[in-house]
Image: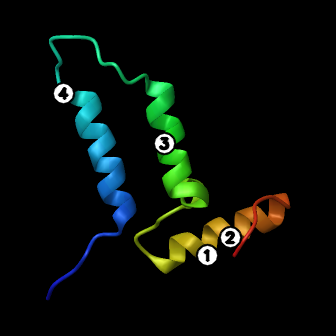
Amino acid sequence: MNHRAPSLWGACALLLWSSACEVDEPSSVALEDVEAALSAVLGDRLEGVVVERPEVAARGVDLLKRLQEGRTT
């Protein structure tokens, strides 16, 4: 079976990998610039929550309803 990971995983993995690499010279790209670029590309997907099982999502929705918080699409 062939599964494709969502593109968000790729972008996050790239950011984590680049942050973890040791660099001999200071980077010319500030963390704020990377954050702004990721926000521009990913938009609202940065606020999303990914869970492994539907039951976990249902509990989260119930909590948000009780607290009268959050939004859905």
**Count of marks, rendered view:** 4
Q: Name the amino acid, label 1.
A: Ala
Q: CA distance from mark 3 to mark 1?
A: 32 Å
Verify CB contact (< 8 Å) between mark 3 and mark 1: no
**Residue 27 % position (x, y):** 30, 18
Residue at the disc numbered 3: 37
Verify CB contact (< 8 Å) between mark 1 and mark 2: yes
**Residue 34 % position (x, y):** 44, 35
Verify CB contact (< 8 Å) between mark 2 and mark 3: no
Q: CA distance from mark 2 to mark 4?
A: 37 Å
* Res. 3 image quadrant: bottom left
Verify CB contact (< 8 Å) between mark 2 and mark 4: no
Q: Residues within 10 Å of mark 1 (few under 14, many from 20)?
A: few
Residue at the disc numbered 2: 61
Q: Which mark is residue 58?
A: 1
Q: CA distance from mark 1 to mark 2?
A: 5 Å
Q: Nearer the viewer, mark 1 or mark 4?
A: 4
Describe residue 70's horizontal placement relative to residue 47 as left or right: right
> Which SS class for mark 2?
helix
Q: Earlier in the sequence, mark 1 or mark 4?
A: 4
> Which SS class for mark 3?
helix
Q: CA distance from mark 2 to mark 3?
A: 30 Å
Q: Residues within 10 Å of mark 2 (few under 14, many from 20)?
A: some
> Which SS class for mark 4?
loop
User: Looking at the rendering, in which quadrant would you find the N terminus?
Assistant: bottom left
Residue at the disc numbered 4: 21
Describe residue 30's horizontal placement relative to residue 59 as left or right: left
- Which residue is at the far front? 28
Q: Nearer the viewer, mark 2 or mark 3?
A: 3
